[in-house]
Image: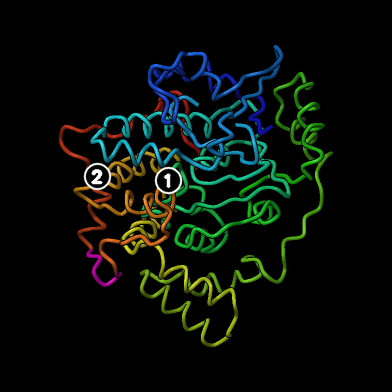
Amino acid sequence: MQRLKKAASLLRQNLHCYGFHTHHRALSSVPHSASADVLDSQVLVEGKPWSRTAILNRPSALNALTAVMGRGRAFCAGGDIVSLYHFINKGKIEDCKEFFRSLYTFMYILGTYLKPHVAILNGITMGGGAGVSIPGMFRLATEKTVFATPETLIGFHPDAGASFYLSHLPGHLGEYLALTGEKLNGAEMVACGLATHYSHSSRVPLIEEQLGNLVTDDPSVIETTLENYGELIHPDSENGVLSRIEVVDKCFSHDTVEEIIDAMENEAARTKDAWCISTAKRLKEVSPLSLKVSLRSIREGRFQTLDQCLIREYRMSLQGVSKQISGDFTEGVRAKVVEKDLAPKWDPPTLGQVTEDMVDRYFSPLSEFEADLELPTNLREAFT
């Protein structure tokens, strides 16, 4: 079971405190008329007077996040993009706004929460799943952990705080992960700082038991507990991206996507390295507009706090689901997840046709009548 230890109050007390409730409509297959008990079952809360455990519980959807929220082989596979896809096609933009407002606000609360809390990433941890864990205090990865921010593959941009935490990774690893959507395993997450601890999945039940028995809010005690069950890690020295960090820095440090791809193709031609060839190929498969938007987002995130990134990403996300701005998101979800023909028709289809104005619109104010995301920064200031 994938659990956020010491943080159930985030999912029950704090959500009520900040003005939205666990009885929101679910972005899932659960009908809007479903009972509160059915909706609440998407997040199970267990615990003792001194600790709480919040369990994501939508295994059939890989624990995809809803406005209400699992169990299974995923910690969380991100936001429920299929429901967003249907909302957009039905013109229900207010439901999209509710989803982004609720999730981004929760991510800010989690990322600034002062009580010690542990996210156990024992499975797929992508997109929004990373957003509700990586900004937190402790993140335990296992050999089952698979991390990615694959939004460019569906015509979107890495969101849910990704422009903050990716931009703070060593060198230009953040740009690589944001643009390619490629995966990291648990050992690689620890090595680059995305996770704080590593343990084999067989030890997870024992770790959960030990954490649940602690009667303390001292982070150092919790850290010691995690270290007692931790293991030495050995990231793949041959096939992984971390063994090619110099190539990543060399290629992904360029100012434009075009220059990045040129540098990657030159490296592939020079070395004949399969990893370089695969990376260059991937960059030509994803949405050209998303590539340019995502690169700018990561570069801006490097100089912003968590709250500034989330507020900007909220604006970008609403622009990104607007068909007046771009249809790439719905086309990407259609091709990759709904109809699964794996042949998205991006618009524009090439980088050369992506204008600066197209990119600027993602970062522009929504409208004079549309408010930006409001976060409780007066209660807890975002970390830098």
Q: Residues within 10 Å of mark 2 (few under 14, many from 20)?
A: some
Q: Which mark is residue 4?
A: none
Per the image, is 353 magenta?
Answer: yes
Q: Quadrant of residue 87?
A: top left
Q: Quadrant of residue 239?
A: bottom right
Q: Residues within 10 Å of mark 1 (few under 14, many from 20)?
A: many
Per the image, is 25 magenta?
Answer: no
Q: Position of residue 366 (x, y in %)?
A: 22, 40
The residue that appears at 66% across and 37% down in the rendered structure is 138
The residue that appears at 50% across and 42% down in the rendered structure is 78
Q: Position of residue 382 (x, y in %)?
A: 47, 35
Q: Which residues are magenta?
A: 350-355
Mark 2 vs mark 1: give the one in front: 2
The residue that appears at 44% across and 38% down in the rendered structure is 80
Q: CA distance from mark 2 to mark 1?
A: 16 Å
- The residue identified by callout 1 is 159
- The residue identified by callout 2 is 322
Three-letter code, disc 2: Ser
Where does the N terminus fall, quadrant-wise? top right
Res 298 seen here: no
Q: Position of residue 369 (x, y in %)?
A: 16, 32
Q: Position of residue 324 (x, y in %)?
A: 19, 48
Query: Viewed as shown, does residue 25 lie left or right of 225?
Result: left
Q: How many marks?
A: 2
